Amino acid sequence: MATIGTPVRRREDFRFLTGGGTYTDDINRPGQLYAYILRSQHAHARIGGIDTAPAQRSSGVVAVYTGQDMTADGVGGLPCGWQIHSKDGSPMAEPPHPVLAVDRVRYVGDPVAVVIADTLALARDAAELVNVNYAEEPAAIDPVAALQPGAPQVNSEASGNLCYDWQLGDLAAVESAFAKATRIVRLDLANNRLVPNAMEPRAAIGEFNRATGEYTLYTTSQNPHVIRLLMGAFVLHIPEARLRVVAPDVGGGFGSKIYHYPEEAIVTWAAGKVHRPVKWTAERSESFISDAHGRDHVTHVELALDAQGKFLALKVSTVANLGAYLSTFAPAIPTYLYGTLLAGTYTTPAIYCETKAVFTNTVPIDAYRGAGRPEATFVLERIVDLAADEIGMDPAELRRRNFIPKDAYPYQTPVALQYDSGDYAATLELALKAADYQGFESRRREAMGRGKLRGIGIATYIEACGIAPSAVVGSLGARAGLYESAEVRVHPTGSVSVLTGTHSHGQGHETTFSQLVADTFGIPIDNVEIVHGDTDKIPYGMGTYGSRSIAVGGTAIVKAMDKVIAKGRKIAAHLLEAAEADVEFKDGKFTVAGTDRSRTLGEVALTAYVPHNYPIDELEPGLDETAFYDPKNFTFPSGAYIAEVEIDLETGQVAVVNFTASDDFGRIINPLIVAGQVHGGLAQGIGQALLEGCVYDKASGQLLTGSYNDYAMPRADDLPTFALSTNTTLCTHNPLGVKGCGEAGAIGAPAAITNALVDALKPLGVRHLDMPATSEKLWRTIQQHRAPIAAE
Amino acid sequence: MQKTVSLTVNGKPVSATVEGRTLLVQLLREQLGLTGTHVGCDTSQCGACVVHVDGEAVKACTLLAVQADGHSVLTIEGVATGDTLHPMQEAFRNNHALQCGFCTPGMVMSALDLVKNNPNPTEREIREYLEGNLCRCTGYHNIVLAIAEGAAVMRGEPAPNVYGTAAE
Amino acid sequence: MEMTGEFRIPAPRQRVWEGLNDPEVLKQCIPGCQALEKVSDTEFNGRVVASVGPVRATFGGKVRLSDLDPPQSYTISGEGSGGVAGFAKGGAKVNLAEDGAATLLTYAAQAQIGGKLAQVGSRLIDGVARKMANDFFGQFAAVMVPEQPAAAPAVERARVAAEAAPPVPPPHPMSTRLPPAVWVTGLAVIIILLLYFFTR
């Protein structure tokens, strides 16, 4: 029975629903010690000295280490995986990133020392006794202010706090188009800083086996091989063969568990020192000041239009905050995952983007669900909506006039990407119909009667995912390949193990990948096992992020299965005494075409492992194939989202009353899982638009939104029931026709919500609202705009 | 300041020696090995650690282990009957109401508490009741569907089967 | 944060001044005060144990007095560290005025908090500060005038300066969520540190 395209219930659910999941913190190793990490309470300070002696003497303490200890032992700094070049061709500033701070702390949360003790409580008690002599210095917190002359200097290697000043696109073409425009629309906006907040806090256990010299790291990671490479090669100098990285069940990541974090290196290194396993688990308040944050852009955008509303050119200038150090993939986010997306779904012929990336005394910033693409979508969809308002055109109509037509593929954008497929107009029409866009004005009037300002907002998006063609990203500065691997191991009796380099942190790979295998091999899903997350088991793979798992990892599985089938045909031809060319594989059987003579996959597998009657001169025994797939292009999911909101005139309380999402994800393997991905992305996007915002005290650099008291996570009663639909065009360059769906909701929702809010407030003359549009902000906005009306 | 506590966990009597500062969730996870109860925050807001104490939903991070002395605790490990999932667990599965699974045990325990007090909750009541449980993966959409389905089945009604997955 | 306030203490000014400079008196009035020593005429070191629920921590602080004008006014500045729980630093100008047989104490304090205290407590601190100050002066008044019942109140009119003072919005629904007991410890400590500032 074909399972692809059907809502198969998840195979992982039984264990998660019965408390049987194994997350990193659920693991305890014999003889394990506990690490407590002492962190800087200052945003910027020189370390005059650290006295660890009283802590060393404290009850139950096994060791206390500082940055000096690690440096003296030859431990390297945390590497950055992407190098960006500035407009002038110079490479980005790349300051060292010590695992534990050595002479200076650069953000509240910067790790300073580690106390290792018999219990966590004893380690924490002893940490109270570590005396750090700080000499406080002024901090650079606001990214725009950090670029001003005389701002406090975060890293001496980055003069003026500038990491790079990057550009993309043809400025001359843009200027010339602007000169001819009938209208130019301008907007200043910000993309609010977010904390990813996967519900599972990060954790790591380091272990060292003296007998074999092998290190093991259990960690909350989306990509164990990446951690093994970065930590082994650059930080601890442990050869791959002696370093095993295991990422068991991972409780959400959203990007924040891609990076190589200091704690992973600390526990692994310390385990080698104390010869006992060392465990660290973040407290939530520690997560807030140690997990990489997301977004934080300040942007000026200008859009030039002709008299018919056609977009002539787009010009974008952004200041992007990087935090105090370069996180693993940070430089790529506000550049190649941002500027390249500014064509969106439109035919804008000339686009120019420049990004100044700036260091500040705040937590490092890196990819968070969507990573650059939500920022690009917000810029573009806000300026398009504003343009519609300024020229007095329906925002849906303005979009229609500028969509890339469905017969224009492959479509080359002016910002480096080549889209392979899509039908943006049809997707928008689907959403408009589902949202009853036509009937909105009567709903607006009805709401006004109840004291509510009702608004509707559209956002379309495109994302480049299925990351990524290695040679392309290499030419753009990536220091890694971004292919994916798979091994398909058919066992002697016909059950199958699939070893994949991707890693699920909630996406249900054990189900989706099993569907692929079950359908291709014609075997029950229960006969398929998916293995991931352990570098000792799986082939070298790059992990899960950038909506890549099905498009890149899934394709690697397909290629490995193709190899299995090709070999199986040879074996079956031998068994069936037929020509290989006459043997076809279908419904789990190798059949001689046009006959009923066949062998099942299980029979062929048994023959491969018990090769008594076997073409041993031509074929090796076994039925176990590995494939690496390097994608030919990015994939380009797209969609149209429509939000409908109501704002209470008296309180500013906002309700998302309808949310309609129409997406094009290419072929869908499991609609249940895809819907879940969209829901979750939408929740994070709506959270960004309405609730979430990471706030630092601009003078002291203290994080003010450092717990769930002050950082407003979306809750069930903040969100609506979502109306989803899909409009499918297949990806043209992978065999499954899949595009990926993991980030879509977070990319499209912030602009849709903000457009709806601005639409609701338009009668008051509101032109733009920065996120998060909290009830308080809305209430103040209403008060400010009402006053002049009342005075008239 | 060590103290021995005796309590019933998932129907079985257990005893353990704890410190005065040991939290119930630490006792469950670290001493009794019941790692299905999770710790997702340190401010008693995420709800990943919800268990039932004497039949009432409690955040196990807000209760000292010594306070549970003599009481009866139900954790996620004690909800299914053997390999047969409780209707609420089954409903979560049918409706894809979990992704990473980290908040799930707390969600299920809260859902059971809701349905005990309100056997036929509306969507709004479900959403409001989940105030104390954070989920970062699902956007709550499917959790709300699941709780409605679980409640229906517990009332003896057929599953709404929104996604067409209930029957296999 | 900035906080100003005034208290009427039913004791003569000279006695209030002496009380505010007497470590033994202060020790009785600061909740959880373990040690308070006068290092010099213008310096105190103190240690306070604060405990709420399962959390218990020791906080150490040192303060310096300046602009001394006995028995009328002084300026106090200092810093305190709660170890991994965070730190506080700041200062206050304290004035004592005669008010019949009683004394009117007014203060204007500024404090900056850091680390976990700031991370989780910034929003809650003002209300707790008011309550703690009230408790302290209630006890201080009782110690100054032992024949009166301890409940005899110091009159408290503390005001916490609101930033920029825009219209007060209606409470966000989020604000009804339970404040975590765990953090109150840290808050109590910063308040105690503030008390150091404006009492010595």
Image (cartoon, rainbow, N blue to C red):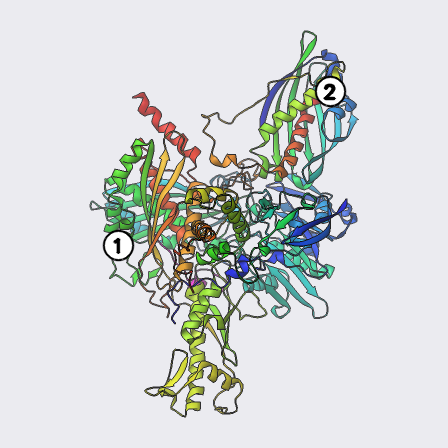
Q: Which residue is mark 1?
A: A425
| Residue projecting furthest to the front | B156
Dot 1: element: helix
Q: Is residue A615 above or below residue A250?
A: below
In the image, which disc is placed on residue A209?
none
Q: Quadrant of residue A758?
A: top left
Looking at the picture, tell me which residue is in the foreground, A384 or A251. A251
Residue designated by label 2: C20
Chain bearing mark 1: A
Q: Residue furthest left?
A: A308
Which residues are drawn in magenta? Answer: A461-482
Image location (x, y in percent) of residue A787:
35, 24
Q: Is residue A470 a member of the stretch shown in magenta? A: yes
Determine if the magenta segment contains residue A113.
Answer: no
Could you tell me which residue is drawn at 43 percent across and 37 percent down? A774
Foreground of the two, A58 or A495: A495
- Type of amino acid at the residue the image marks with label 2: Leu
